[in-house]
Image: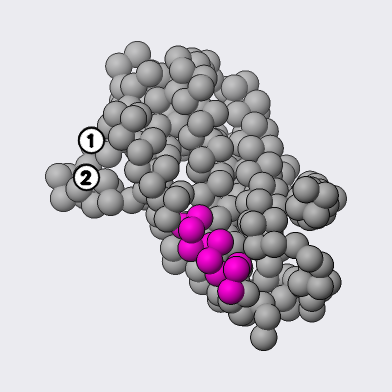
Amino acid sequence: MTGWQTLLYKETLRFWKVGFQTVAAPVLTALLYLLIFGHVLADHVKVYDNIGYAAFLVPGLVMMSVLQNAFANSSSSLVQSKIMGSLVFVLLTPLSHWSWFVAYVGSSIIRGLCVGLGVLLVTTWFTDLQFAAPLWILVFAVLGAGMLGTLGVIAGLWAEKFDQMAAFQNFVIMPMTFLSGVFYSIHSLPPFWQRVSHLNPFFYMIDGFRYGFFGISDVSPWLSLAIVGTAMLVVGSLAVHLLRIGYKIRS
């Protein structure tokens, strides 16, 4: 147990030492989204009855920040270690692939939740939020951060340079995040794009997370939980397999 705990501590300390960049900056970005979109669209968009657009927007921004920063944590750590050559020092340790997985994904969950909590605390100054089902909030936050941290491990193992990592984030993670209902309800979309949105697992993370605040969602939170849990199982199995065979890190 000491091995994975040490690696988890090292990965957590890595992002915390530059907390102004890894935690404070994403919080500021989310706040700017709220101020701009909330001000411009507040009088033009009505999503749910008795829920203002700014209040609707906050859970989406919180979850978006959780997902993006969880992915960035594990992916950037692996890519930096591979490029700088410091990954060899971790490879020399008698850590199992499970220890790697728990440490990298665990630190990603910690960073994602820290950023999400910061966004939530800052944005509550500008709108009144409800907490209809706090347990759903916690479940989807942890599952979402874990899934994106796992995707970050896969991307970090695959990428061999920073531009490959940036391409994965810009062409896969960012579009799936922004097209998942952060800024809108999918019921406002044409039928075709509603069906497309239902194919995006990120939509279920954000929709289930939002249900925890308002008790209202576009789909059942149990359906969202089943889909997110299945997706986490699939990507988790792939990540553990890649770590076990040493994909692109033992050659």
Task: Tell me, yes or no, whether the two marked residues, 1 and 2, touch with CB atoms within 8 Å.
Answer: yes
Q: Label 1 sits on what residue type?
A: His
Query: Which mark is on residue 194?
Result: 2
Viewer-proximal residue, 157 or 20? 157
Please tell me whether mark 1 sits on a helix, a strand or a loop: helix
In the shown orientation, is residue 18 left or right of residue 225?
A: right
Instruction: Give residue 19's mark.
Output: none
- Within 10 Å of disc 2 (Cα), the crowding (few <14, some 14-19, many 20+) is some
Residue positioned most to the left: 191
Where does the magenta region start and end?
Answer: 235-245
Residue at the spot x=54%, y=28% of the render?
Answer: 138
Q: What residue type is labelled 2?
A: Gln
Q: Mark 1 Cα within 10 Å, few/some/many (few <14, many 20+)?
A: few
Residue 58 visible: no
Element at badge 2? helix
Give the side of residue 207 with respect to residue 84, left or right.
Answer: left
Whole-percent x, y for residue 92 in the image: 81, 73
For residue 20, side relative to residue 243 (left or right): right
**In x, y percent, where is residue 113?**
64, 37
Main SS type for the magenta part? Answer: helix
Q: Tell me which numbered mark, 1 or 2, is placed earlier along the sequence.
A: 1
**Front-most of residues 10 and 243:** 243
* Residue, disc 1: 187
Left or right, 150 with respect to 214, comes to right
Q: Which residue is drawn at 60% across and 67% down?
A: 243
Identify the residue at horizontal 79%, vertical 76% (top origin).
88
Residue at x 76% of width, y 72% of height:
91
Q: Please identify the quarter of the rendering in which residue 221 is found.
A: top left
Q: Distance between the residues labelled 1 and 2?
A: 7 Å
In the rendering, at what x and y percent does residue 187 appear?
A: 23, 35
Q: Which of the colour schemes (rainbow, by chain, secondary structure, one colour) is used?
A: one colour
